[in-house]
Amino acid sequence: MIILSAIFIFFYTIPICIIAMLQIGHIKTNNKAVILNEKDFITARNYALINQYFSIVEAIFSGVLFIFWINLGLILLNKIVVFNNIFTAQIVIVVTFLAINTILNLPLESYKTLIIDKSFGFSKINIKLYIIDFIKSFAMLIIFGGLICAGLIYLIDNILNWWIYGFILMLFIVLLANLIYPTIIAPLFNKFTPLNDEELKNSIANLMNKVGFKANGIFIMDASKRDGRLNAYFGGLGKSKRVVLFDTLLSKVSHNELLAILGHELAHFKHKDLIKNIFIIGFVLFVLFFIAGNLPKALFENIPNNASMKICILILISSLISFYFMPLINYFSRKAEYKADEFGSNLTNKTDLGNALVKLINENKAFPYSHKVFTFFYMSHPPLLDRLKALNFNYK
């Protein structure tokens, strides 16, 4: 367990801290305001710096939490949770692990949302709504987490190469989540109102027809009650597909700029980027389950070698495995964003898309500079300066 703890700290916690320090140095070095005015540039710079310092705190906390669970927490869970039915006991152990982990991470997450984001004017959520959101999310974690764990425990206890079937099960759940998210999960947290601007609705419909995209409605989401940042997306699979516009977006961009943003999003549909992303996620899941299904027996010297412990370890190492897949995932994502920008600018026009991107960075106070290592590991979208350059858009 000491060796596994050392691996996690050396290959996860320390690299995250190093990348954050590189980004902090890069932010401090780049003092010339671009795209943003001087005041907003300073705000974006300060917000970016605080986020990086906060990411260091999160990384250290994750390392401490990992050491706790691997060396003591999992052992205690096995001793405390006692049921006559072994199958039930194992489900309770994993669900308890998930619940405790969520509660232990709550102080940092709430501080980020209620203190940092609110102080910069991004977060609009009040404490009451935050608590309600947490209770809903926590309940979903316990219910659906318990059901998924029950399936995985059954596979581990009854099938030799359980990890293959476990991978198939999780891939199915990913597909199901994408299918039901827009119509079942998202409405639990936000109100979705059909767009009643007929002119805009017809313009969006015409845009979708150009690429053969069929949506089950165009909706406005009440994002402003939680956050002031701008966004829009196409969600769902098959007949559940829908267009979602943040209410914050409608009040900040023109109709033409909004269409340019949607043209960019439609490019992801046209290029089948969602399907490609599912394949990439599937590959990551396959590797994760392969590792979990072939853990060395020496790992279980101090903890029981049972299904619940294998699942807990799988969850614990998932952040480490995902960290080293993120550069690959983000590389393809950035490539897709450039292609989507090009497609969207041709579908509408370059000027509207460029103006929309500039407004997005101004309203979201996104710092325009990023260190190459930070971009390589974390950024699913290219830096805005690079996107505008690729569009040959003059932002000055």
Image: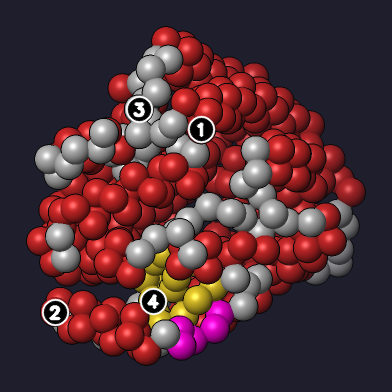
- Kindly report the distance in space between the C-alpha atoms of the residues bearing marks 2 and 1: 37 Å
**How many discs mark residues in the rendered view?**
4
Give yes or no for residue 57 being in the magenta stretch: no
User: Crowding near pointer 2: few (<14 within 10 Å), some, many (20+)?
Assistant: few
Give yes or no for residue 193 being in the magenta stretch: yes
* Three-letter code for the amino acid on which mark 2 is drawn: Lys
- Kindly report the distance in space between the C-alpha atoms of the residues bearing marks 2 and 3: 35 Å
Residue drawn at x 33%, y 85% is 199
- Kindly report the distance in space between the C-alpha atoms of the residues bearing marks 1 and 4: 30 Å
Give the number of the disc on residue 34: 3
Give the number of the disc on residue 210: 2
Using the rendered view, name the quadrant where residue 346 is placed. Answer: bottom left
- Sequence-earlier tag: 1 or 3: 3
- Sequence-earlier tag: 2 or 1: 1
Judge whether 72 appears above or below 254 on screen: above
Q: Which residues are magenta?
A: 192-196
Residue 185 appears in view:
no
Give the number of the disc on residue 243: 4
Rendered-image quadrant of the N terminus: top right
- Kindly report the distance in space between the C-alpha atoms of the residues bearing marks 2 and 4: 15 Å
Q: Secondary structure at mark 4?
A: strand
Q: Secondary structure at mark 1?
A: helix
Q: Nearer the viewer, mark 3 or mark 4?
A: 3
Judge whether 277 appears above or below 203 on screen: above
Disc 1: which residue:
40
Using the rendered view, name the quadrant where residue 281 is placed. Answer: bottom left
